[in-house]
Amino acid sequence: MSSDQLLLITGATGNTGAPTVEFLLGAGHRVRAFVHRVDRRSEALAALGAEIVEGDLLDLHAVSSALSGVTAAYFCYPIAPGSLLPATAIFAQAASEAGVGAVVNMSQISARRDAKSNAVQQHWLAERLLDRSAFGTTHLRPTFFAEWLKWQWRREGDQGVLRLPFGSGSQAGRHAPIAGRDQAAVIAAILQNPAPHDRQIYPLVGPQELDHYDIADKIADTLGIPVRYEPIDIPEFAAALTAQGRSDFFVQHISSVAQDYQDGIFSGENNLVEVISGHKPMTVGEYVNANHAAFGQDGPYAVAS
Ligand SMILES: NC(=O)c1ccc[n+]([C@@H]2O[C@H](COP(=O)([O-])OP(=O)(O)OC[C@H]3O[C@@H](n4cnc5c(N)ncnc54)[C@H](OP(=O)(O)O)[C@@H]3O)[C@@H](O)[C@H]2O)c1
C-alpha cells in the first residue's frame, strides 16, 4: 500500500485507535481520524498530521461521508447498550458503497454464538455481518487489555490491591494481558497490507499468560510496593460497578465475561502480535513502567473492600 491511499480510523481517540493513527502517520500514510467529539485527544492527532472528521458511528450520512475515498478502515465501537449492530450495519453499507477494500474489525476473544454477554454475542454477530460484504475483513479478538490493570487498580496507602472476580487459588483463571498500543501495531500492519488477512480471525494476547496472583507479583516487582490480588465473587463485583454508575448493559457484560475468564475463555498464548506487526508485545512489567503515574491513584473501576 502506498501513501496515496487513505486509511480511516474510527474510535480514533480510544486505546487502540489513537496509537493506530500514530503508527500509520509515522509510516507516511494519509490518515482520516473519525472522532466522536473534537477535544484535546483529537487535537493531538491533528497535530501529528491526521485529518479529523467529527461524527457519530450511528449516523449513516456522517459515516458515508467519512468513508469517501478510503481504501481500508479500522472499525472500533465501544461496549454501549444495544448499538454495536446498527453501527456495524451502517459501517458495512457505507464502506460497500464507498468501495473500501478492507475493514479491520475490533471484536473480543470471547465472541461466540452462545456467549452469555449480550455485548459479546453482538460482537460475534457483527463479525458475521461484516463477512457478508465484498470487502476484505479481519476480526481481532483480544483478551483483556493490559489497560484493565490500571483501571481496576486500587491504591491503599503504600500498597496496591486488585479486587476482582477472576477465581481463587489453583482455580484462578489466566490470561496474557495485551496493551492497546500493541494491538494498534497489528491493526496498522494489516491496514497497510490487508490481502493476506482477509477473512481471518486473530485472538490477540500479550507475551505471557498469568493469573492475578502472578500479575500482582509482577506489578509489585515493578513498582517496588506490596501488591495483592483479592478474589471476590461476581455478584459483589457487579454490585460495585452498579454503585459506580455503570450501565446495566455493561454490568451484564462484565459479569458474564468474568465467568468466561474463570472458565478459561480468556486464556492462551500465541505469537500473532510479533508475526503480524514485527515487534514483541509489552510484558506486564513494561506496561506498568510505561504507565507508572496511573498506579499512584485508584483506577476508575477500583473496588473498595
Ligand atoms: N477493554 C478490553 O479489555 C477489551 C477486550 C477485548 C475487546 N475489547 C473491545 O475493544 C473495543 C473498545 O476498543 P478501545 O478500548 O480501543 O476503545 P475505547 O478506548 O473504549 O474508545 C472508544 C472510542 O470510540 C469513540 N466512540 C464512542 N461512541 C462513539 C460513537 N457513537 N460514534 C463515534 N465514536 C464513538 C470514543 O470517543 P469518545 O470517548 O469521545 O466517546 C472513543 O474514541 C470494544 O469493542 C471492546 O469490546 C475490549
Image (spheres, helix red, strand yellow):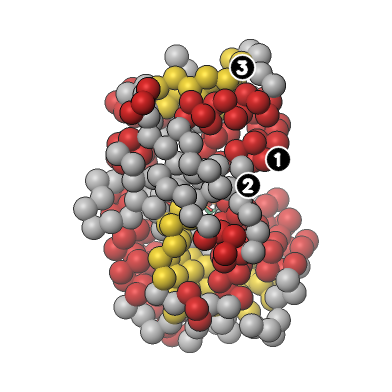
Q: Quadrant for the N terminus, please.
A: bottom right
CA gap, disc 2 and disc 3 = 22 Å
Expressed as whole percent of the image width and height from the top left, the position of residue 40 reads 70, 50
* Quadrant in the rendering for residue 27: bottom right
Residue 128, how many percent across, how many down? Answer: 30, 69
Q: Quadrant of residue 227?
A: top right
Q: Earlier in the sequence, mark 2 or mark 3?
A: 3
Mark seen at residue 226? 3
Sort mark 3 into few (<14), some (14-19) or many (20+) by Cα contacts within 10 Å.
some
Q: Is residue 210 left or right of residue 5?
A: left
* Residue 12 in view in this figure: no
- Viewport quadrant of the C terminus: top left
Q: Residues within 10 Å of mark 2 (few under 14, many from 20)?
A: some
Q: Is residue 139 visible?
A: yes
Tag 1–tag 2 contact (CB < 8 Å): yes
Query: Callout 3, which amino acid?
Result: Pro
Look at mark 2 in the image and give the residue it sits on: 282
Is there CB contact under 8 Å for labels 2 and 3?
Answer: no
Residue sitting at x 33%, y 41%: 264
Q: Residue at x 39, y 74 (%)?
A: 199
